[in-house]
Image (spheres, rainbow, N blue to C red):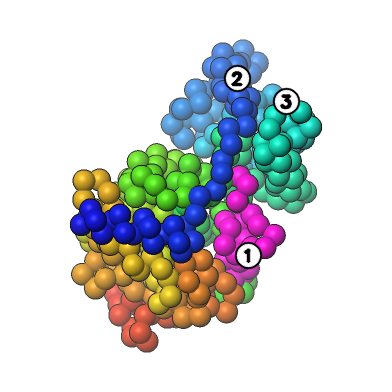
Amino acid sequence: MLLALGVVFLMLATTGWTAVHRPDAGIQARAAELVAWASARIDGRPVPPADAPVRTVARFFADLDGAQRGHLADGYPLVVGNLDGVPAELRYRANRRSLALAARLEESRGRDVALTPADRSTAVRRAHRFESLAEPGRQILVFDPTGGGLVAEVFGDLSAARRVSVIVPGVDTDALTFERSQRRLTAPAGMGRSLYEAELSTAPAGRTAVIAWAGYTAPTGVGVDAATGRLAVQGAARLESLAAALPGDASVALFCHSYGSVVCGVAAHRLPGRVTDLVVAGSPGMRTENVAGLHTSARVWAMRDEGDWISGVPHMEVGGLGHGADPVSPDFGSRLLSSEGARSHTGYFEPGTASLDNFAKIGTGAFGSVACANGSDGCRLGISATDGD
């Protein structure tokens, strides 16, 4: 079994799961803000700790007026912009400010002759990425420039949404790879926009929102982190906090791609009841042997394209390596979806594919018309006509 895992590492290295260089940009601004936040007050009132429960944070900000909220967002943007429980619009405001400041810092580093040419080049790329994320109209829910960087973007009106879809991407995801000008739909931002547009087409009056969530530290390339659950455990805690902090009483569907499905699998048993659907695509496993092992009341759906190289990954766990059973195997117990038209491991969000169409139908509650794998109707069994209401 260990030999099989070793062979898989070699296969992955030659089939597209390649490393992305993540330089340490030396950005310590958020750490400094966290220190200042710990003793901050607003009109004599202490602010909640940065690790306070979501409900505590939400109650605190609900009691503030607009001027007080703005003062905190402008004074501590790297804290407020990443603090679950803060109103979404205030987080967008804080993160626009953080992005502008981070872009200027990276522009300066790009001109610093004391740095290596490679580091200067990376700084310039980061500056351009941060400027793009800060463009008018973009709704950045998470922005932490530390290390590779964490980013999440909202498409639609999150506060008014009745249904929220959250995309959880896989390896080699950071601030630089959050969006791409080429192969746009292989990056979280492109996936998010594609799903949101598909949901609008499926249910124009459905009041949906989509979050492209690169809000956890993903594995870089092939290595121990990609084959174990360490980073998935850390990401699961962040995902649980996000789900608990979403405004209103909207139902939530998670769309988990590649290593993102490991994150979703680890988080499943602690997700709030508002998470009604968990969809995995191109999954290496969910660190369990079957749906029952996830200990969730959410419907669990799975798909994999015939040409997806991840089908060659041994679906097992030995000594902490590997992620368990294959979610598309009959014994796992998932509702199996068609992915017809998707190409390889990164094509699930392409317009015109059955995979994207199924995502949009699940995201809008149109369960009765999802396309099951192999033309069957098995994935729709047990779902009543009112489940999508």
* Mark whose residue sits in front, 1 or 2: 1
- Percent position (x, y) of residue 330? 24, 73
Check disc 1 and report the residue beneath it.
183
Q: Is residue 386 above or below residue 69?
A: below
Q: Is the C terminus in the top left, top right, bottom left or bottom right quadrant?
A: bottom left
Which quarter of the picture shows residue 22? top right
Question: Magenta region's main secondary structure?
Answer: helix
The one nearer the camera, 145 or 9, is: 9
Residue 194 covered by magenta stretch: yes
Nearer mark to the viewer, of 3 and 2: 3
Q: Residue at x 76, y 28 (%)?
A: 113
Image quadrant where residue 297 sits: bottom left
Magenta region: which residues?
Answer: 175-200
Q: Is residue 193 visible?
A: no
Residue under label 2, please give it. Answer: 32
- Specify which label sits upstream in the sequence, 1 or 2: 2
Extreme bottom residue here? 375
How far apart marks 1 and 2 lie (CA) works out to 36 Å
